[in-house]
Image (spheres, helix red, strand yellow):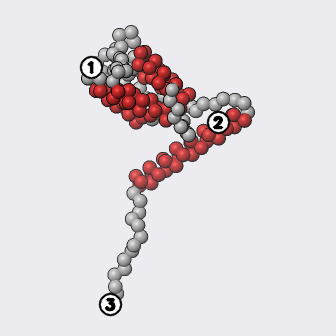
Amino acid sequence: MDLPRFSFSPPKPRSEDRLEEVLRRLEAIERELLLLKRRVAKLEGKEVFPQRVEPPRIAPPKDRPVPAAAGQVVLLERIDVGNVRVIETLLDWVQFIMSKVGPEGFPEIVEYYREIGWISDEVADLLLRYAQGLRVDVEYPGYMLPEDHAKSLDYISRIKEAMR
């Protein structure tokens, strides 16, 4: 009589798991290349910044007109600097953006958010002032992905909620 054979090998990884691992490795390689480019440029006496990928602009629904630049509706018009919860969320948001793009790319992201109507000029100035006082360790500054911009939009909604 033959006994059944059992295998104690771990289950095979799913294709989604493998894809995520490959993407993580590619991102790490991209970061390494960026660091190497910066080191070479520094040795040559040049300054190099990473290429920025502008997030895709989503077309507005056809039934809703696009606001004119002058009369554009702004999601976050002001910041209540007397509200501790608002300031904590704002600082978390600034740290999040700086962890993604570094201090060099921060003004570019703030300007982009101002252009698309997420923040006002007043809020943009405040963000830039807060960023000057923060030091965030950014080993691999790069660019923001669409998911990162969605997280920024979440920060904006949390700030608005805290001011109510």
Figure check: 32 above or below 109: below
Residue drawn at 34 percent across, 81 percent down: 4
SS state under label 2: helix
Any part of residue 44 in sight: yes
**What residue did someone put label 2 on?**
38
User: Does the CB distance between marks 3 and 2 fall below 8 Å?
Assistant: no
Image quarter where the C terminus lies is top left
Location of residue 57 (image quadrant): top left
Q: For this rendering, which residue is in front, 116 or 57?
A: 116
Q: Mark 3 to mark 2: distance in Å?
A: 68 Å
Q: Residues within 10 Å of mark 2 (few under 14, many from 20)?
A: some
SS state under label 3: loop
Rendered location of residue 110, percent (x, y): 46, 23
**What residue did someone put label 3 on?**
1
Figure check: 28 above or below 80: below
Inspect the image, locate mark 3, and give the three-letter code of the amino acid beneath it: Met
Q: Residues within 10 Å of mark 3 (few under 14, many from 20)?
A: few
Image quarter where the N terminus lies is bottom left
Inspect the image, locate mark 1, and give the three-letter code of the amino acid beneath it: Asp
Q: Which mark is residue 63?
A: 1
The earlier-in-sequence mark between 1 and 3 is: 3
Q: Mark 1 to mark 3: distance in Å?
A: 75 Å
Residue drawn at 34 percent across, 85 percent down: 3
